[in-house]
Amino acid sequence: MTKAVSSVQSDIKTWLGKDAMASVVVFLVALPLCMGVSIASGVPPTSGLITGIVGGLVVGALAGSPFQVSGPAAGLTVLIWQLVQQHGLPMLGVIILLAGLIQLAAGLLKLGQWFRAVSPAVIHGMLAGIGLLILTAQFHVMLDGKPIGKGIDNLLAIPDALTRAVTGGGAPFHAMCIGIMSIAVMALWGAYAPKKLKVLPAPLIAVVIAVIAAAYFKLKINYVIVPDNIWSVIQYPTLENLKHGFETPILIAAVSVAFIASAETLLCASAVDQMHQGQRTKYDRELTAQGIGNTICGLFGVLPMTGVIVRSSANIEAGAKTRASAIFHGLWLLLFAAVLPFTLRYIPVASLAAVLVFTGYKLAYPKAVPKLLEFGKSEVAIYAVTIAVIVGADLLKGVVLGLLLSLFKLLYVFSQLDIKIEEDAATNCVHLRLSGSATLIRLPMLASALEQVRAGVEVHVHFENLDYIDHACLDLLSNWEKQHEASNGSLVIEWDELSRKFHQRRSGALKAAA
């Protein structure tokens, strides 16, 4: 008994040791990203740090995915920036509070799985579109400028901004050099860093080198501005602001944040599950935890959070064993924010923007296209349209249009039925070959085809090219068989063929899932 207890205690110490080391790595990854996402969202840099603290200490303890790390996400920067411009910073907290309550309610109502019922083409299109929005907006910040407006406007303005930085010199040119250097460091570190040193995250290395270079050359560029007390950025919702929460634009904004944050979180959780052999994600619990976290962030008036893949993958790669690593990373952020906030003032804004430009590039890179092509060109078309509308109009319109196109595609697929009637006069036999989907929508078409069959013949119904048949169509065939038999005819339905076909598909799907 004593040996067993000793063994358990030893295992716990080993796990805690590994979790503590992993949490330091996650903290180092999270630090520049929390600030970069804040600046890109149009809020104070310390706002993202507070969100990271809540994501670690609160959501980390409650999460349904023990290895997933939560914090401010690049995927929400564009939407949050738009909301800040439209409604002001004081109303952001109300919007995030409502979004958190929506997520909390969805989790308690066990709707977690439904948030995953979104076409992969739309999800990948959303992420790629967000990547382009981040890249085009933060490119201007990397030149010590400001985003112009919509994604397409930022994209079209890049050549002119680049020309002015190169030819004009001064702060924009120096900031551009810091930004390009930061991107180069991240790319080279990821490709050529010694294996033992790769535990140090590329964004942190890039920011540290940028700080050293900017200090050595005494560059007159924009640096991160932080208050002496980082908690001063907290803005509790006022009663007046809460009253505005019932207005339609605010409710639409809250639903948008809740939907996108939930979809991104649960997509990330699915990806995290594929990276380890431990406990699988409990999606409803994860959604509930995210709702609690965003409710707290809304009360504080800081950035919303999601599950984030970069920090989560770093957590697993660093050897995390339990959820303690995610919790510890929030503790390190808290200690840093409380003791060393003054060090943030030495960080060039251009280097944080470069981190997000690089992140945006990785999100926008069309690596999903080959997989989508396996399921048809229509999936790639939905992906491309989603990206185009996100960049040309806004994030919400792009996602909604992508969802509608996916729905139309589903309706189209389930409404396509091809019927071929082949007569064999020698045997007085008719072959009815069905392909596509025999559903209620195409029942009149099937009924019309059956009416064309002569009385007194033997009819064979073939299913080898059929994707789906519903009860209504089977019932039609059954009733028609009775009528046809009354005219001395007969109906032969290849039930074995249909059963074998769908059994093989089910077995194949189960093997693929395994």
Image (cartoon, rainbow, N blue to C red):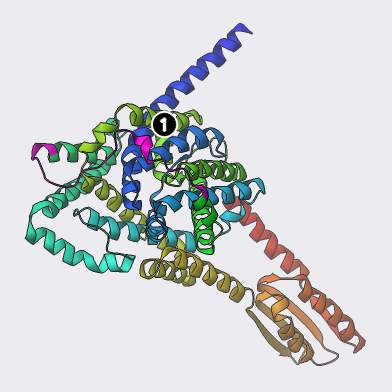
Please state, as top left, top right, bottom left or bottom right, where the N terminus lies in the image: top right
Q: Could you classify mark 1 by the number of other residues whose Cα lies within 10 Å: few (under 14), some (14-19), or many (20 or more)?
A: many
- Judging depth in this view, the residue of 450 and 37 nearest the camera is 37
In the displayed structure, 500 sits above or below 178; it is below
Q: Quadrant of residue 149?
A: bottom left
Which element is circle 1 on? helix
Residue 226 is inside the magenta segment: yes
Q: Is residue 296 above or below residue 168?
A: above
Residue 325, located in which quarter of the rendered image?
A: top left
Left or right position of 506 against 151: right
Three-letter code for the amino acid on which mark 1 is drawn = His
Report whether 263 appears left or right of 336: right
Q: What x and y, as percent, mark residue 238? A: 49, 47
Q: Residue at the location (49% across, 68% down)? A: 402
Please tell me how many numbered marks the rendered image carries. Answer: 1
- Picture coordinates of residue 368 (x, y %)? 41, 59
Q: Is residue 55 magenta?
A: no
In percent of width and height, residue 274 lies at 50, 44
The residue under label 1 is: 329
452 versus 69 height, above or below? below
Q: Which residues are magenta?
A: 215-239
Q: Percent x, y for residue 115?
A: 57, 55
